[in-house]
Image: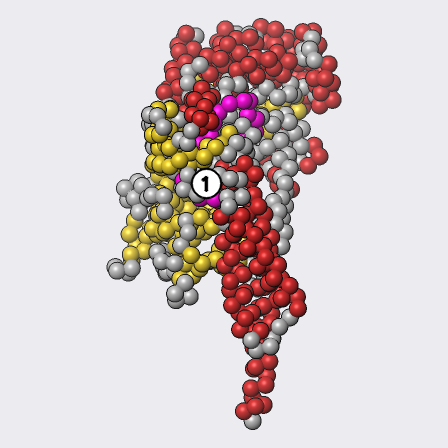
Amino acid sequence: TSAQGGEVESTIDAALRSYNYSRVLELAERFASLGSRAPGYPGYERALELIVGEAQKLGLNYTIQNFTMLAPVEGESYVEVLEPARLKLKAYGLWPNGGISAGAGSAEGYLVYVGKGRLEDFDGKPVNGSIVVIDYDGSLDGWVNALRFGAKAVVFLGGGSPEREALSKFDPLVPIPFTRLYLEPREAAQLKDMLARAPVKARVYTDMELRDVKGYNVLVEIPGAEKPDEIIMFVAHFDAWCVAPGLANSTEEALSPAALLELMRYFAEHKPPRTAWFLFTSGHWNGLAGPREFVRWFILQRPDLMRGERTIWYVMGLDISADVPVASLIYVGHFYQTSGRTFITTKFYWLQGAVNTYAQYISSFLNETGLPRSPALKSVVRTLGVVRPIDLTHGPEWMWSSTMSKPYVLDTEPFVIAGMAAFTLRTSYSYRPLEGEPTSDLSYVRERFEDRVVPQLASAVAIATGLLNEPTINVMKSLILPTRLHPLLYWGFLDLQIQVLMYNITQGWYDTVPYAIVRVSRWSSYPFAWMLVRADHNGTALVYGVTPQGLNAWYVEAWKPINSTWMIMPAWGMRSAGPIWVTLLVPRGYTSVYVMPLQTRVLVDLYNPRLMRRTLEDPRYATANVWAGGGAWPTPFETETGITPLYQFVSSDDRTGVYLAGSSAVGNLTITLSMAGARWPVAVTPGGERVYWALDYAVGTYTIAYQRYTVLSTREVRRLSADVMMDYAGQHISKAVSAAKNLVWSEAYRSALAAWSYASRAYSDEVMPLYDECIRSAVMFVPFIAA
C-alpha cells in the first residue's frame, strides 16, 4: 500500500542520514594497519579479531566457522649480498605461477640490472646464469625476457606508483618453477645503489609454497523484531590479495568489510523487522574457499533453511572500490559464469523494481548533500544512474551495456549455484588499478572516498534497509530455497571426489599419490577462478561447489612439485589419461586423474610463426576476445630413437605464449611444435635445454629443413622459392646467433623470430611438399620400371 511504501521510504531516508560514512573509512584504515590479510599471515588473524571484537561490543551473537584451505605462504624470503660487501635484505616471494609453483629454494649468481625489462634494457648484460634485477613499476611481463635468456631468478625493485602491474608478474595458468622476489622501496634503493658502484654477487632465497592454513567465516546475527524467520544476508570478504602475499594490506579491499561492520552497528541500534545475517568470509582469492565452505557446511546442513521454515530471501554481497560513484547489481562472476539463464534472472525481477524505487531516495540524499562534488562525477551519476540493477538481467558483459571492466569472482557466486537469490553490489566500470599492488593505497582511497565511495555506500544502505523493511517480498519461495541439486539440473552445489593415481609399471596397477595439489576449474585464464585442494594420505581430494552438467563442465588435474626440473604432474601415456573433464548428474561424483614424475622444460614464444604477434585483449569483453596468437602444440621425441616418451604432458597459456612440457625421457629430446590445421610442424628443436625460445626453434627447424633439402638438391630436385626461404632463414639465424654472443639481446630476439618464420615456411611450405611430390612420383614410376 502507499502507506506502507511511505513507511519504507522514511526508514530508508533515516538510514541514509544516520549511517556513519566516515567510520567506514576509519574501519578500512584499521584493517589496512593490521599487516598482510592474506590467509596464513598474522594480519589475517588480527582482522578476524577486529570483526569479532565489533560484534562483542554490540552484544551480538556470532558463529565462527573453521575450515582449511590452500594458500601461498612464506616463512622467509631474502636477498643476501655476498660481494663486494655482506648485506641481507628482506624480500617477499611473489604469487605462484599457475597458483602452484613459486620457485621455492635458493639461487646464487651475479646481479644484472635491466631497468624496465624491455628487450633493449637487456642489451650488453650477461643474463645467462645471472640473477636479473628489474624495476617493478612499468616492467609488466618483462620478467619473461629474463626467463627466456637464461636467468636463474628475478628480483623486482619496488618504487614509484605502480598501476595494473600485479597480474603480469606471474603466469596465471602454467606452474613454471621460477623464483621471483620483491624488495620494498627502501631495500630496493639500497641494492640499486650497490649495483651502481660495483658488480654484486648475491644469493636469493624464498620458501614460498602452498600450505594448508586455517580459514575462518564469521556469521553475526541480528534477530528480526517482527519476522525473525525471514532473513536477508549480507556478505563481504575480509582477507586481501597482493602479488606479494606478505604485503596484502589493501585499504580499498577493506572498504567492503568495513561497510558491513558499520551496517551491522546501525541495524543493531535500529532493529529491523526481518533478521539480518552478516557473513564475513575469506578465501576469496583462494578459489572462493570460504563462501563454498559456508554454503556446503552451514546452509546445506540446515533443514530449516532447506525446507523453507526459515527463508533467506536475498543474499547481498559488497565489492566496493574507489573508482566511480556508480554501483551495479550483478550475480554473474567469472568463477561459475552462469549468465543469460532465465531460471536464475527470474529471481531478481521484483528486486529490480524495488531498487529502481530506492534509487530515487538515494539520488535525493546525494542531491541534498551535494555528492559527488566533482561536476564530472555528477555527470557520470546522471548518465548512468547511481545504482544499476539492469545487469541482473543482461549480465555484466552484455556487450555495449557492459559495466564490468575485468575478470573477477564474487563471494555470492556459490550461493547462486545453490539455488539462492544472491547478488553483489559492485562498483561499475571498476578497473581497480591498484588491486594486488605491493604499495599502500591509503592516500588513494582517502582522496576518493567522499566523491566516489560514499555514493556507493548510500546505495548499499538503501538497498539493505529496504530489503529488511519491505512489507512483502514478491518472489516465489520455491525458487530461492537452498538446493543440493535441482531436479532439472538448473542449478546445484555438488561434491567431486578425486583420486590421484600413478601407474606402477612393475606391478601392472595404480598407486595412489598422497598430498598432491588438485586443481579444478571450468577452465579460465583468470587465476582466482580455480579451486585448489590437497589430496590426503590416500591420494583422495574432495572439492565442494561443483555445478551440474546443465551449467558447467569441470577440468581436473593434479600437481606435486619436486624441484626446479622435476614435477609429479598430469601425464599422457601408457595406462595414464592425464587430466580429465567431468560433468556431474548426482550430488557427489567420483573421478580419477593420472600423474607421473616428469622432467620439465619451459617453452616461451609459442606463437604462430606466420603471424608472430600477440592479440590485444579488451578487458571489458572477455567473452568476445579472439586470440590470433598461440595454438602451437609441442610433442617430445627421443632424439636417438625417434619415438615419443612413455609419458608426457603440456601445460599451456596461449595468451602469454609460455608452456611447460613434461617428459619421462631424461636424455636428449627433439620437440616438434604443431599448429592446428597445419600438416607439418612449424618448429623442430633438439637439445636438452631447460628453457627453449625462438632462436632454438629457428635453428632446429632450419637444420632439419637444410638437411632434407640438401638430399633433394643433390638429386637436382630444387625450387627457387625454397632457395630464397632457406637463404633468408640462414641469414637471420647468423644475425641472431652473433647478436646473442655479443649480448645484443634485442637484435637476437628480433632476428630469431624472423629466422623462425622463414625456416618454418621453408620447411612446411617448400621442402616437405617437395618430399611428398618425390614420394608420389616414385610410387607412380617404380611399377613401370619394374615392368
Indicate whether 630 appears above or below 339.
below
Q: Position of residue 84 (x, y in %)?
A: 36, 28
Give me the residue at 36% from left, 43% from top. Answer: 564
Q: Amino acid at mark 1?
A: Pro
| Residue name at image x 42 percent, y 16 percent | 34
Q: What is the crowding at mark 1: few (fewer than 14 residues within 10 Å), some, or many (at least 20)?
A: many
Foreground pick, 606 / 262: 606
Provide the residue designation for mark 1. Answer: 126
Q: Secondary structure at mark 1?
A: loop
Magenta span of residues? 149-167
Image quadrant for the N terminus? top right
Closer to the camera in the image, 305 or 530: 530
On the image, the x and y values in percent for residue 430 come to 61, 26
The answer to whether 159 is drawn above or below residue 760 in the figure is above
On the image, which quarter does residue 337 sit in?
Answer: top right
Q: Residue at x 51, y 39 (%)?
A: 124
Q: Does the segment drawn in magenta span residue 60?
A: no
Question: Residue 292, percent across and down?
Answer: 44, 32
Residue 62 visible in rendering: no
Residue projecting furthest to the bottom = 787
Quarter of the image with the C terminus is bottom right
**Dominant SS type (magenta):** loop
